[in-house]
Image: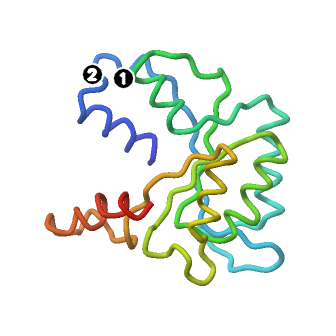
Amino acid sequence: MKKILILIILLNTGAITPETVGKIKEVPILCYHNIFEKEGKPGPYYISAQLLEEQIKYFKENGYVAVLPEDIYRSYIYGLPLPEKSVMFSFDDTRKDHYTLAAPLLEKYGYKGAFFIMTVAIGKKNYMTKDEIRDLARRGHCIGNHTYDHQNLKKLPEDQWKKQVEEPKKKA
């Protein structure tokens, strides 16, 4: 889904044209939400730290290079090559476990990730603080905007878009 969204954004901004779409290298983007250390809720938005590490280790052992959104952007816009075996690790919703579990696991294997921040949650229980988010950025991870409070943008009235998309940039 994120690959499609990135492509749509680039098409809508005129950064690429429909004629060049076929020349774009596809990059698998793995999106994670909740990570638990010992016991957790089963479901599509939950993964154990052990399974996450197994997945990261698989990509490392099979020669994949982790890329970030800016790498993909530079490839689309400037034609800079991406590694043949590229993968992006993405984490949504500002969860504390992204800071305490995911980032250290990525770094253990020499990878960086993209962390998409829901600004209304910053500093709340089980969510990252501003200092933790800044620390991720200092350590080379990508920090991106994931709306203000996680509204369904498909159903959002147009007058609410500014609050969801533009205002969070001011809080970062």
Residue 161 on image: x %, y %: 22, 63
* Tag of residue 170: none
Q: Nearer the viewer, residue 69 or 84?
A: 69
**Which three-letter amino acid code belongs to the residue tagged 2?**
Thr
Element type at marker 1?
helix
Occupied quadrant, residue 64? top right
Residue 49 on image: x %, y %: 79, 64
Name the side, left or right, on which 62 lies relative to 168: right
Kindly identify which residue carries mark 1.
21
**Crowd tier of the residue under label 2, counting other residues whose Cα lies within 10 Å: few below 14, some 14–19, many 20 or above:** few
Q: Is residue 145 above or below residue 73?
A: below
Residue pushed farthest bottom?
125
Residue found at x 45% / y 46%: 2
Residue found at x 23% / y 36%: 12
Residue 145 on image: x %, y %: 43, 56
Q: Nearer the viewer, residue 137 or 55?
A: 137
**Which three-letter amino acid code belongs to the residue tagged 1?**
Val
Of the 4 image quadrants, the one containing the C terminus is: bottom left
Occupied quadrant, residue 160? bottom left
Name the side, left or right, on which 76 lies relative to 155: right
Tags 2 and 1 touching, CB below 8 Å: yes
Name the side, left or right, on which 86 lies relative to 40: left
Name the side, left or right, on which 118 lies relative to 60: left
Kindly identify which residue carries mark 2.
17
Q: Is residue 45 above or below residue 72?
A: below
